[in-house]
Image (cartoon, grey):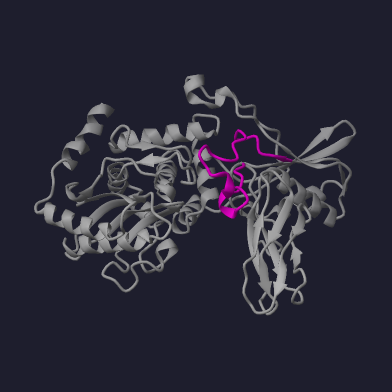
C-alpha cells in the first residue's frame, strides 16, 4: 500500500502549470548572471502540486543546512505521534568499594547549562543534589553512553572541528558544547591577555597593534587541549570574544561538575573523566537486521533535570540553524527503535520520506544538520517533502519554526523591503561553495508556492544568494 501511495504525488507533480516556459527562461536568465561555474537546481510547485518553475529539478545537490528540514520535520512528526525519549540530564552516586563516584548521565538534552546566571536546566542543580548527600567523592564521570561515540558525522570537513559549528556531538552536552575565548588588548607591540576555562591551555602568538582592528583567530588540533591564538587586535579595541567547539563534551561536563562540587565544599579525590560507548556493528541497522539492543534500566537517579519543550529546540534549530541541536535530535529519533546511531536516525527519516512520496534516490543523507559534504538531495525531493509537511496536522507548527524573510532568523536581512518581506518562510543553507533555500512563499496573487533552490560549486567571488533571491522574487511576481 505504501508503494501505491508514494506514486500518487509523482503523477500529480508531472503536470506542468500553464505558461511555464517563459518564466523558466526568465529565471534562467537571472541565474545565468552569476557567471560560469555555479550549478543551479530549482523546483517551484503551486498548491495543487503543479510545476510553476523548474531547472534541473531531478539532479542531486549538496543541501547544506537545508538538511535540517528533514531532521526537524521527522522530530516534529515523532513529537506529534509517539513522542521522543526523555532528554534531561541526571546524576547518580555509585558505590565503588569504600568510595562514592558521581556519574553525570547525558540523555541528549541540548540545553544543559553551567553558566553562573543559569535559571533553568542548570548543572548547578545537580551539583547541589550531590553536595546535599555527601562531602566526599572519588571520580566524577561524564556518561554519554546513551548514544554511540560518533562525535562527528561522515563527510564533515576536519577544519570545522575547532569551530563552534563543528563541535563534538554527545549525549552529554553542556553550554552548547562551546567555550568562550576572551582576548583583551595590551599595549601596542605586546601580547593581548587571554581568558578561557582552565580545561585548556593557550599558545598566544597574537599581538596588540595601534588602532582598533581585530584579525584574531583560534585553532586547536582535534581532541587537543592547546588553543593557538593568532592575529592582531587594536590597542583601542574592546575585548574580543571568540567561540570554539568542544571535542569531548562528556569529559568537559565532568570537569565542570567537579569544579562546582569543590566550590560547594565537596572533596573530589579522584579524576574527572568521560565514559563513552564505542560504535559497534549492532549500531548499524543493516547489520543487526533492525533489532535494537536490550537496555538494562539504570538505578534511580539522585536528581534529574527537565529540559525546555521540544518545540523550543526546533525553533532554535531552524531559525538560527543550530547544528548541535539538530544532530542531537537525529540521535534521539534513533532511540525509539534503535541504538541512537546516525544510521538509526536516517532509518526514521527514510520512513518519513516514504510516507511523503519523495522519489527514491532523491535524498541521501549522512548527518542531521548539513555539515556533511556527503549529503545529496534533489530540488524535487525537498519540495515534495515540504509540500507534504504542509498537509500534516503538525505542519503549521513546523512552518512556524522557519525563518521569515526580512523579519527573523537567518532571513532577517534577506528580502527586507521587497515583495516577499514577511511573505517567504524558508530554511537557509550555507557551507563551502554551497547555498540553499527551501520552504514556502506567497506570490503576488496570494497563491501559496512551495519551492527548493540550490547553488553548488559557487566560485569564491560570487554571491549566489543575491541571484537566488532575485529569481524567487521574479517567480512570486509572475504568479
231 left or right of 80 in image:
right
Q: Is residue 443 visible?
A: no
Location of residue 473 in the rendering, given as x and y in whole percent from the top left corner? 25, 64
Residue at x 38%, y 55% (from the top left corner): 427
Location of residue 343 in the rendering, given as x and y in whole percent from the top left corner? 49, 31
Residue at x 21%, y 38% (from the top left corner): 9
Asked if residue 448 is positioned above or below residue 337 in the image, the reply reads below
Secondary structure, magenta segment, majority class: loop
Asked if residue 87 is positioned above or below residue 198 in the image, the reply reads above
Image quadrant occupied by the C terminus? bottom left
Location of residue 16 in the rendering, given as x and y in whole percent from the top left corner? 13, 46
Picture quarter containing residue 56?
top left
Picture quarter containing residue 26?
bottom left
Region rendered in magenta: 142-170
Q: Is residue 246 visible?
A: yes
Q: Is residue 156 magenta?
A: yes
Q: Is residue 74 magenta?
A: no
Location of residue 218 in the rendering, given as x and y in whole percent from the top left corner? 66, 58
Q: Nearer the viewer, residue 119 or 425?
A: 425
Image quadrant occupied by the N terminus? top left
Residue at x 65%, y 42% (from the top left corner): 106
426 left or right of 1 in image:
right
Asked if residue 105 is positioned above or below residue 21 in the image, the reply reads above
Amino acid at each position: 500500500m505504501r508503494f501505491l501511495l508514494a506514486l500518487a504525488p509523482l503523477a500529480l507533480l508531472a503536470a506542468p502549470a500553464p505558461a511555464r516556459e517563459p518564466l523558466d527562461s526568465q529565471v534562467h536568465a537571472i541565474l545565468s548572471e552569476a557567471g560560469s561555474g555555479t550549478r543551479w537546481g530549482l523546483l517551484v510547485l503551486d498548491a495543487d502540486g503543479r510545476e510553476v518553475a523548474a531547472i534541473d529539478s531531478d539532479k542531486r545537490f549538496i543541501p547544506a543546512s537545508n538538511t535540517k528540514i528533514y531532521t526537524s520535520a521527522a522530530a516534529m512528526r515523532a513529537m506529534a505521534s509517539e513522542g521522543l525519549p526523555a532528554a534531561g540530564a541526571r546524576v547518580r552516586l555509585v558505590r565503588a568499594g569504600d568510595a562514592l563516584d558521581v556519574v553525570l548521565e547525558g540523555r541528549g538534552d541540548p540545553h544543559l547549562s553551567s553558566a553562573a546566571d543559569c535559571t533553568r536546566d542548570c548543572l548547578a542543580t545537580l551539583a547541589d543534589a550531590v553536595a546535599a548527600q555527601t562531602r566526599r567523592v572519588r571520580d566524577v564521570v561524564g556518561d554519554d553512553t546513551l548514544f554511540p561515540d560518533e562525535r562527528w558525522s561522515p563527510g564533515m570537513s576536519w577544519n570545522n572541528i575547532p569551530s563552534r559549528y563543528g563541535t563534538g556531538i554527545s549525549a552529554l552536552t553542556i553550554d552548547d558544547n562551546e567555550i568562550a575565548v576572551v582576548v583583551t588588548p595590551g599595549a601596542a607591540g605586546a601580547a593581548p591577555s587571554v581568558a578561557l576555562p582552565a580545561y585548556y591551555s593557550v599558545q598566544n602568538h597574537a599581538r596588540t597593534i595601534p588602532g582598533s582592528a581585530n584579525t584574531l583567530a583560534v585553532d586547536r588540533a582535534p581532541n587537543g587541549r592547546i588553543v593557538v591564538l593568532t592575529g592582531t587586535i587594536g590597542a583601542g579595541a574592546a575585548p574580543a570574544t571568540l567561540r570554539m567547539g568542544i571535542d569531548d563534551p562528556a569529559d568537559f561536563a565532568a570537569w565542570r561538575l567537579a569544579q562546582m562540587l569543590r566550590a560547594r565544599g565537596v572533596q573530589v579525590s579522584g579524576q574527572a573523566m568521560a565514559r563513552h560507548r564505542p560504535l559497534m556493528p549492532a549500531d548499524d541497522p543493516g547489520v543487526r537486521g533492525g533489532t535494537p539492543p536490550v537496555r538494562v534500566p539504570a538505578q534511580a537517579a539522585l536528581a534529574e533535570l527537565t529540559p525546555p519543550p521540544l518545540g523550543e529546540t526546533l525553533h532554535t534549530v531552524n531559525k538560527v540553524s543550530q547544528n548541535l541541536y539538530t544532530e542531537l535530535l537525529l540521535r534521539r529519533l534513533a532511540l525509539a527503535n534503535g541504538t541512537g546511531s546516525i544510521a538509526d536516525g536516517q532509518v526514521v527519516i527514510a520512513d518519513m520520506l516514504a510516507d511523503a512520496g519523495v522519489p527514491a534516490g532523491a535524498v541521501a543523507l549522512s548527518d542531521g544538520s548539513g555539515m556533511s559534504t556527503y549529503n545529496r538531495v534533489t530540488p524535487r525531493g525537498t519540495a515534495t517533502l515540504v509540500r507534504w509537511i504542509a498537509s500534516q496536522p503538525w505542519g503549521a507548527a513546523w512552518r512556524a519554526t522557519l525563518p521569515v524573510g526580512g523579519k527573523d532568523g537567518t532571513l532577517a536581512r534577506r528580502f527586507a523591503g521587497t515583495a516577499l518581506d514577511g511573505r517567504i518562510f524558508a530554511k537557509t543553507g550555507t557551507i563551502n561553495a554551497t547555498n540553499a533555500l527551501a520552504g514556502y512563499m506567497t506570490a503576488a496573487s496570494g497563491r501559496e508556492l512551495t519551492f527548493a533552490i540550490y547553488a553548488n560549486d559557487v566560485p569564491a567571488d560570487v554571491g549566489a544568494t543575491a541571484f537566488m533571491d532575485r529569481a524567487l522574487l521574479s517567480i512570486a511576481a509572475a504568479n
